[in-house]
Structures are given as structure tokens and as C-alpha cells.
Amino acid sequence: MIEFFLNAYKNASMIQIILEFVAFVFGILSVWFAKKENILVYPTGLIATIITTYLLYVAGYLGDMMINGYFSIMSIYGWYKWARKKNDTEVIAISRTNNKEKITGMVFFFVTIFVVFGIYNFFDYEIKTANYIDIFASGLFFTGMWYMANKKIENWTLWIFGDIIVTPLYAYRGMGMLSLQYLIFTILAISAYLEWKKILNSSQNQEVQK
């Protein structure tokens, strides 16, 4: 296992290894802060996604590159949404999606798949099995990021499913640190879902008591 992990970096430059490690650390920090409903999820996430976008561009993985580029944009949007306050109280609280938001999420998912597939074709890239997995995961992550910006608990369900899919995908592609990162993401996402659910249930109970 360790040998497989190290072999992937035999031909990698030192700058690539350093950048992957920095993205790895800040990516983990970002998910940890998201779990704690801490706004630092966004600045730490920005560092991780910008670096990862560059690394994936160099590696030629367009779908993954796009998703991380989108993460960077959505991090700015989410940062703004989470920072908003009214009378010193956060405007957005953890909640579940309503029917309209579920439909919006489905639109995000299918539009993302269509756009990423179109980009692969536009640049005349050969779409292999791994790329179809990448395209599907992109749809999950695009939607999950939008749900997270609006503090919808369903974002964690999408992250868990997506993380489970891409963990072996990155290992297959020889990007060991990213694979390990997404494995840790999966564990953190499960823990975060349980924590957000506890907060949501507590909030609902308080509303009932009022």
C-alpha cells in the first residue's frame, strides 16, 4: 500500500509534491471547519481548490479541474452568504431542502453533467470509463457545494456519495495524496452530517417549545 502510494510520485517534481501536500492539508482543514459550521471553511477551501485546479490542469483532467475551479467561485459566494448577519445573528441557519431547492439541485446536477461532457467533446478528449465517473461526480459536487453555501444538510449526503466514488479514482490515476484526502473527506463528511443533524434537531425542538 505504501509502495503503491510512493511509486506515484517517482517522476513528480518537488513543486508538485509540495503543492499537493499544501492542498491536502488545507482541504482537510476546510471540511473540518465546515463540520463545525465555522466560516473559515471558505478561506481554507479557497487555498486548497485553487492549488488543486492548477494541478489538475497540468495533469489534463478537465472535469476535475472544472469542479475545483467552480469550488473556488462558490467558496467566495458561500463566504459572503455565511458572513451575512442581521442584528448580530447569522442570516442563514442549518436547514433541510424544500421541494423547490430539491428541483434546483437536480437542475444543477444535470446541467453540470451536460456542460462537463460538452467540454470534453469540445476539446476532443477521449472519454474513457474514468472520465464518465469524473463527470458524474462533478454533478454531485457542484450541487453539494451550492447546498453547503445555503447550509442545507443534504450537502453532506452528496459529499459522502461523491467522495466514495472519487477516492479510488484518484488512486487509479496515481494521485495518492488526493485519494487519501478524499478518503479522509468521506469520514469527515459522515461525522459532519451527524453533527449538523444534531444541531438541526436541537433547533427544531427549540422552535416547537416556543
Image (spheres, grey):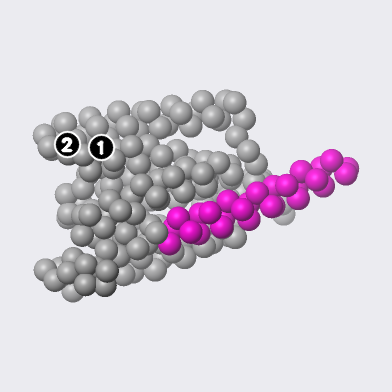
Q: Quadrant of the N terminus?
A: bottom left
Between residue 143 and residue 81, name the one nearer to us.
143
- Where is residue 149? Give x, y as percent: 52, 45
- Where is residue 64? Give x, y as percent: 28, 47
Q: Amino acid at mark 2?
A: Ile
From the image, tell me which residue sits under label 2.
127
Q: Earlier in the sequence, mark 1 or mark 2?
A: 2
Between residue 194 and residue 106, name the one nearer to us.
194
- Where is residue 184? Give x, y as percent: 43, 62
SS class of the residue under badge 2?
Answer: loop
**Quarter-of-image position of residue 132:** top left
Contact (Cβ within 8 Å) of mark 1 with mark 2: yes
Question: What residue is shown at x 88% (from left), y 43% (from top)?
Answer: 210
Residue 96 as seen in the image, left or right of residue 159: right
Q: Marks 1 and 2, how far apart in space?
A: 7 Å
Residue 137 as seen in the image, left or right of residue 17: right
Main SS category, magenta section: helix
- Give the vertical position of 66 relative to 59 (above or below): above
Q: In this picture, which residue range is highlighted in magenta?
A: 184-210
Question: What residue is shown at x 63% (from left), y 38% (from top)?
Answer: 96
Residue 142 as seen in the image, left or right of residue 204: left
How crowded pointer 1 is (Cα within 10 Å; few <14, some 14-19, many 20+) is rated as: some
Do we see residue 137 in this rendering?
yes
- Where is residue 77? Give x, y as percent: 48, 46
SS class of the residue under badge 1?
Answer: helix
From the image, tell me which residue sits under label 1.
132
Q: Amino acid at mark 1?
A: Tyr
Question: What residue is shown at x 76% (from left), y 43% (from top)?
Answer: 204
